[in-house]
Amino acid sequence: MTQKYFDQCTEFLLRRRTLVKPPHMTMPNEVEFATNQDYLKGIKLVGDKRTLNAVEVAYLYHAVESNIVGANLIMGFAHSVPALEVERLLHL
């Protein structure tokens, strides 16, 4: 029952473009292993740059999604508080 409501809410948010789908990643046909320590050095400003791996893409997506939810919560709270109350709190 809960899954049904979750799916309905998700479809509603997707239709309104409030919720975005996570990036689609294709599965590789073969396994690649890191052969040297350069893979672990992070961002290189000069030279060949490696592509992001699935875990890094997932972290970026989660960070963006969390920021969107936080911004929407702040906007919701801002719309629900009377302007005089906000002014009173700011002048403390």
Image (cartoon, rainbow, N blue to C red):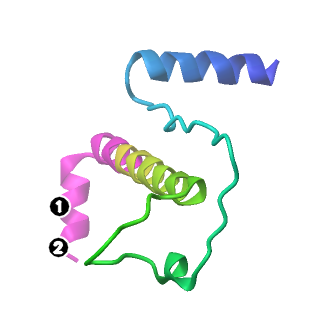
Q: Which mark is residue 58?
A: none
- Counting from the top left corner in percent of width and height, residue 15 is at 43, 15
Residue 89 within the segment the image draws in magenta? yes
Q: Is residue 85 left or right of residue 43?
A: left
Which residue is painted at 45% across and 31% down in the image? 19
Q: Is residue 45 above or below residue 68?
A: below
Quarter holding the N terminus is top right
Q: Is residue 67 above or below residue 89?
A: above
Which residue is painted at 62% across and 15% down in the image? 8
Neighbour tally class for label 1: few under 14, some 14-19, many 20 plus, Cα within 10 Å:
few
Marks 2 and 1 sit apart, C-alpha to C-alpha, by: 6 Å
Which residue is painted at 27% across and 78% down in the image? 45
Read off the magenta span. 73-92
Closer to the camera in the image, 18 or 43: 43
Q: Which secondary structure is most common in the magenta stretch?
A: helix
- Counting from the top left corner in percent of width and height, residue 13 is at 47, 23
Q: Is residue 48 above or below residue 5?
A: below
Mark 2 touches mark 1? (CB < 8 Å): yes
Q: Which mark is residue 91?
A: 2
Residue 27 within the segment the image draws in magenta? no
- Counting from the top left corner in percent of width and height, residue 90 is at 20, 69
Closer to the camera in the image, 85 or 13: 13
Q: Which amino acid type is shown beneath numbered disc 1?
A: Glu
- Residue at numbered disc 1: 87
Q: Is residue 87 left or right of residue 27?
A: left
